[in-house]
Amino acid sequence: MVQAVLQAEAVANMMSKETKKILVLCTGNSCRSQLAEGYLRHFAGDQAEIYSAGIETHGVNPKAIQVMAEDHIDISHHTSNNVDEYAGIHFDSVITVCDNANEACPFYTGKVDRFHQNFPDPAKATGTPEQVMDEFRRVRELIKAFSADFVSQYINK
């Protein structure tokens, strides 16, 4: 009897530790969603599979790669993907990181938790090269804090 209870607890623990699939969605999958993918992977480790996509694809912004490298996270291997490429994947959560993606987000069947946080688009920053990079860093820090909180609240619970 005790062994059966221990086995049931072990199975329950394994099921509660199932890897969650998270999609981060933005307009062009070039900056904000790439930053979020990098930080969510960093904070979640092997507890989640993180994907990012866009309603369109604009390529990964080199400045996004640069500001993440400054924080010791390598996203240089990331690709810019269209949301349609992931049509066959059941996501546990979809995070939209801009209002445009939130409005255009496809409908997902089944139980999918949706989260939305509109971050400024650093690719639209103007000014000197240093001012533009400062905006990328500012947005990076906003996304880093959001990602750490998300993992703490929804993945590590």
Image (cartoon, rainbow, N blue to C red):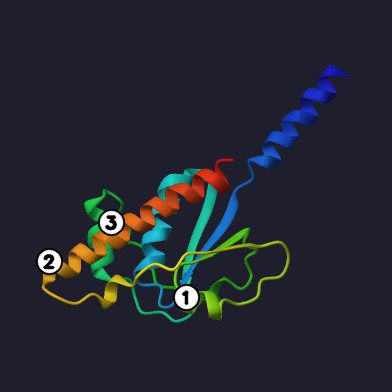
Distance between mark 3 and mark 1 Cα atoms: 23 Å
Residue ID for mark 1: 99
Distance between mark 3 and mark 2 Cα atoms: 16 Å
Task: Report the front residue among 36 and 126.
Answer: 126
Neighbor class of circle 3 (other Cα within 10 Å; few <14, some 14-19, many 20+) is: many
- Mark 1 lies on a secondary structure that is helix
Residue ID for mark 2: 130
Amino acid type, mark 2:
Glu
Q: Identify the image quadrant of the N terminus.
A: top right
- What residue do we see at 74% from left, 35% from top? 11
Q: Residue furthest top?
A: 2
Dot 3 or dot 2: first in sequence order is: 3
Q: Identify the image quadrant of the C terminus.
A: top right
Amino acid type, mark 3:
Met
Residue 82 visible, this orientation: no
The correct choice, above or below, for 128 with respect to 1 in the image is below
Q: Nearer the viewer, mark 3 or mark 1?
A: 1
- What residue do we see at 51% from left, 43% from top? 152
Q: In the figure, is residue 28 to the left or right of 48?
A: left
| Residues under numbered marks 2 and 1 in contact, where contact means CB atoms less than 8 Å apart | no
Dot 3 or dot 1: first in sequence order is: 3
Distance between mark 2 and mark 1 Cα atoms: 27 Å
Q: Which mark is residue 68?
A: 3
